[in-house]
Image (cartoon, rainbow, N blue to C red):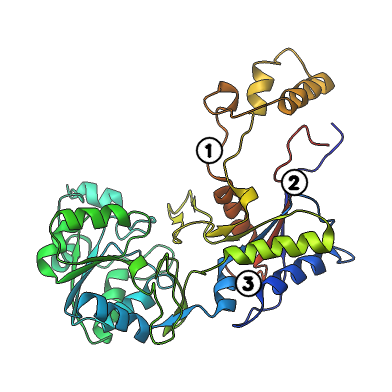
Amino acid sequence: MTRRVGTVSRGIRTPIVREGDDIVAFVTNAVLDAASDPEWGFKVRNRDIICITEAIVGRAQGNYATVADIAADVKAKTGGGTVGVVFPILSRNRFAICLRGIAKGAKKIVLQLSYPSDEVGNQLVSQDDVDNLGLNPSKDILTLEKYREYFGYKLHAFTGVDYVDYYQKLIQECGAEVEIIFGNDPRAIIDKVDAVIAADIHTAPRTIRILKEAGAKKVLGLHEIMNEPVNGSGYNRDYGLLGSNKATEDKVKLFPRDGQGIVDEIQRIMLEKTGKHVEVMVYGDGGFKDPVCGIWEFADPVVSPFHTIGLEGTPNELKIKYLADNDFKDLSGEALAKAISAEIAKKDGSLVGQMVSEGTTPRRLTDLIGSLSDLTSGSGDKGTPVVYIQGYFDNYATE
């Protein structure tokens, strides 16, 4: 073994993206400029990966929708009467502006919040509080009054916001009446509303199915709102409002659309300019769970909406520590290194179900690489919306 460096993930600093920017040129120029930097530069290699945060793609596309756009779409699709909103996540960035638009498109909102936490782990109350009261969230439906009697005014541990109060006042400020209930059975809302919007992200298909089977008059998912332009607005045909982020107090940036051509073109230009075949992907939330607060960092509908074909599939890896502790337990030093390298080099076909691969991560490549990119770029002021990864497809046997 002579090579001493494995996978390297680099954040690439870029200018600030503006609406109308040529995102293909923007990304390729940023990568090539970084590669040629006299102090921090690097050599472009085959199977390197260029990862682009979804935010700059959506911004360059101008893929925005205003509260008025959302309100118009909600009114047209629900009738604008009493609208139920079921299982939204607790987020000022991800859902509050969407809720503002929904409320402006209805006369009354019946808001059903799941408890003790939302879909991605934001707690309204603790599980211990629920257990101590003998409540069963899958069956027990609470009114706002009963919720306050049981739990009082709870502030989110990290944001310091009482989301119940925050969402209630937000809806009222938009001119709609509001009723809030708590429970994990979406059928509880059916008799109270004319239409229901399933506002959950990853569990929405099940929520929609349950509501329809129970006879709900009209059921929509967030993916069906802003899935077409409204008065010249942005839109996302596949995801609608899913994956949107707050842009201003009156506007959201939607998840990027039509991005396959973008990643394919970046790959083509990089090959033309460097002679190297790199992979390219657009990524959003990485899909990991914080071990302390319990929040699942996955408010986007998918980790990677667009990627080049070489990023399809899952890892096919041997577990080095298994080999060292079992097959080659009597070896050490250089002999052990050579034996393991040889075993890795000769692996062939899928290793699924084989003990020697036990413990390797069975997630899709795009999900794993997206998580690495999300952690590298951060969500604040690093200024690195492009991530350049090298050595990801190498292994212990690669020289």
**From mark 3 to mark 2, how far is it between C-alphas?**
26 Å
From the image, which quarter does the C terminus lie in? Answer: top right
Helix, strand or loop for disc 1: loop
Residue at the outermost left position? 191
Residue holding disc 1: 362
Q: Position of residue 337 (x, y in %)?
A: 79, 25
Helix, strand or loop for disc 3: loop
For label 3, the crowd category at 10 Å Cα-Cα, with few meaning under 14, some 14 to 19 and many 20 or more, is few
- The front one of 89 and 209 is 209
Whether pointer 3 and pointer 1 mark residues with C-beta atoms closer than 8 Å, the reply is no
Instruction: Tell me the quarter of the picture where residue 373 sits.
Output: bottom right
Q: Is residue 121 left or right of residue 114?
A: right
Residue holding disc 2: 391
- The front one of 97 and 216 is 216
Residue holding disc 3: 381
Instruction: Tell me the quarter of the picture where residue 318 sits.
Output: top right
Residue 147 in sight from this viewpoint: yes
Q: Position of residue 108 (x, y in %)?
A: 18, 79
Residue in the picture at 55% in, 38% down: 361
Q: What amino acid is at disc 1? A: Pro
Residue in the picture at 67% in, 77% down: 22
**Comes first in the chain, label 2 or label 1:** 1
